[in-house]
Amino acid sequence: MQRVATRVFVGSSIAFGLIGAVFFVSTLVAEWQMTDALFAVWGVTGCIVLSSLALSVAAKYLGPNS
């Protein structure tokens, strides 16, 4: 379980960074109207990052017997 949670954490962290970069670049372009959608997706990936980090840490400290 820790291995899966760690992989999800790494993947969602990369997605969080990429979406965040696109979001902040898109705020510079006033004509592009996707900023609300990108902000929502960025928030969702942030939640995935935090929850997968919590699962990874919990699995590490709880051990395989729990």
Image: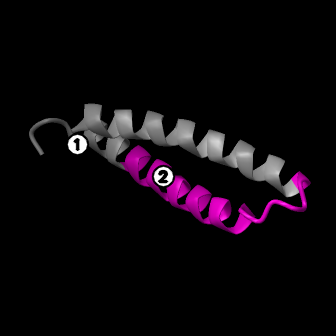
For the residues marked 2 and 1, what is the alpha-carbon distance in whole angstroms? Answer: 18 Å
Amino acid at circle 2: Leu
Residue 2 percent location from the top left of the image: 27, 36
Is 59 above or below relative to 35?
Answer: above
Three-letter code for the amino acid on which mark 1 is drawn: Leu
- Mark 2 — residue? 50
- Report crowding for label 2: few under 14, some 14 to 19, many 20 or more residues within 10 A (C-alpha): some
Which residue in the structure is indicated by mark 1?
62
Picture residue at 22% right of the left edge, 42% below the top:
62
Mark 2 secondary-structure assignment: helix
Report the magenta residues as a range. Answer: 28-54
Residue 43 at x, y percent in the picture: 58, 61
Residue 42 in the magenta stretch? The answer is yes
Closer-to-camera residue (31/60): 31
At x 72%, y 46%, the residue is 22
Q: Position of residue 34 (x, y in %)?
A: 71, 62
Rate crowding at label 1 as few (under 14), some (14 to 19) or many (20 or more) other CA atoms within 10 Å.
Answer: few
Q: Do the residues bearing badges 2 and 1 touch, measured as CB atoms within 8 Å?
A: no
First-in-chain label (2 vs 1): 2
Q: Secondary structure at mark 1?
A: helix
Q: Up-down: is 23 above or below 39?
A: above
